[in-house]
């Protein structure tokens, strides 16, 4: 994860957070225009995320839920004023786009497949978000109707020739998305933290909840293609996860949803 030392956080901080991080070195670790992420070099490390008002409420709730399952870092503070602010402890280790892990793609592929299967076997009875699939499909439908269609980020094997073709595939297959597991929702290498190849935790839970496992499986295949610049690990990943719970036709349905953002 990239870290750039900065002299101070430009936004006005909530008083409690300002006092907590006072005097500590601060690094900008942002990777998305939707949010700013700052690393606070204090104790074992903390992350402070800032986003527009209301945007981090779900993430705060789900981060704490994953922490209760031993799958993420503890939430220390969630504050909403002019912005949303989320302060968490750092998950020990490095994310999976670190060169240590990318340099051994077979082991990396097997590791993230194994950890995903474990996640999907986690009890979710008390999850705060119990119908993520419906939310997911509603977002895809809304984006289709507003013309948000972009296939440029997806490999040819998942591509559709037009928005109409993708939407038809989604309409035909969406009712088959009935599986219920605890989802990460954005199962990509930067969101998986390993400590010397041992699983340490997940980060970024804005898309998490209980839903169909093929959403995470799609992103697992996608992230290996995107970060390793090849689709050769697709079958290895699915084999390592376990073909007994995979319906490959549903990966095409998820792909149809994802081109609508």
Image: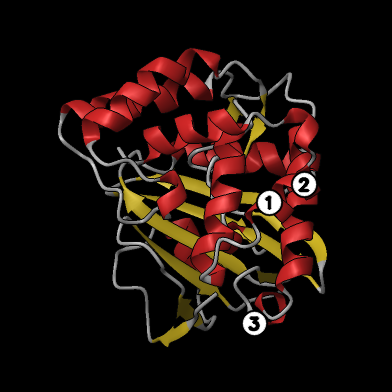
Of 246 and 198, the residue lying toward us: 246
Residue highlighted by disc 1: 235
C-alpha distance separating marks 1 and 3:
23 Å
Q: Residues within 10 Å of mark 3 (few under 14, many from 20)?
A: few
Kindly indicate whether the residue at mark 2 contacts the one at mark 1 (C-beta within 8 angstroms).
yes
Q: Are marks 2 and 3 in contact (CB under 8 Å)?
A: no
Is label 3 in a helix, a strand or a loop?
helix
Residue at image position (32%, 32%) is 166
Q: Tell me the quadrant of the picture where the C terminus can be found.
A: top left
Q: In the rendered structure, which disc, 2 or 3, sits on the residue that comes first in sequence?
A: 3
Viewer-nearest of discs 2 and 3: 2
Measured as percent of width and height from the top left, residue 228 is found at: 56, 70
Point out which mark residue 6 bears: none
Q: Residue at x 38, y 24 (%)?
A: 170
Q: Is residue 195 above or below residue 50?
A: below
How far apart are labels 2 and 3 at the CA level? Answer: 24 Å
| Quadrant in the picture for residue 244 | top right
Q: Nearer the viewer, residue 212 or 127?
A: 212
Q: Residue at x 62, y 49 (%)?
A: 75
Rendered residue at 40%/53% (across/down): 154
Across and down, in percent, residue 97 comes to 59, 72
Q: In this rendering, would 48 be left or right of 81?
A: right
Q: Is residue 220 above or below residue 194?
A: above
Residue corresponding to mark 2:
239
Local crowd size for mark 2, using a 10 Å CA cut-off: few (<14), some (14–19), many (≥20): some
Residue topped by disc 3:
99
Q: Are marks 1 and 3 in contact (CB under 8 Å)?
A: no
């Amino acid at each position: 994860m990239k870290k750039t030392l900065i002299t101070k956080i430009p936004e006005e901080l909530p008083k409690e957070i300002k006092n907590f991080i006072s005097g500590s070195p601060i690094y900008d670790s942002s990777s998305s225009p939707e949010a700013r992420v700052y690393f606070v070099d204090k104790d074992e490390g903390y992350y402070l995320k800032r986003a527009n008002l209301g945007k981090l409420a779900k993430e705060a709730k789900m981060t704490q839920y994953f922490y209760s399952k031993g799958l993420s870092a503890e939430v220390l503070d969630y504050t909403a004023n002019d912005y949303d602010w989320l302060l968490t402890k750092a998950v020990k280790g490095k994310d999976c786009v670190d060169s240590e892990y990318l340099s051994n793609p077979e082991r990396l592929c097997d590791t993230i497949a194994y950890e995903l299967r474990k996640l999907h076997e986690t009890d979710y009875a008390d999850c705060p978000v119990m119908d993520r699939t419906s939310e997911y499909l509603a977002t895809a439908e809304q984006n289709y109707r507003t013309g948000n269609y972009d296939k440029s980020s997806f490999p040819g094997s998942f591509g559709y020739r037009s928005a109409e073709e993708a939407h038809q595939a989604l309409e035909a297959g969406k009712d088959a998305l009935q599986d219920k597991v605890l989802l990460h929702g954005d199962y990509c290498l930067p969101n998986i933290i390993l400590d010397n190849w041992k699983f340490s935790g997940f980060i970024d839970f804005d898309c998490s909840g209980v839903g169909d496992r093929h959403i995470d499986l799609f992103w697992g295949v996608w992230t290996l293609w995107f970060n390793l610049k090849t689709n050769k690990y697709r079958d290895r990943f699915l084999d390592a996860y376990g073909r007994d719970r995979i319906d490959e036709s549903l990966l095409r349905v998820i792909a149809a949803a994802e081109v609508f953002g």
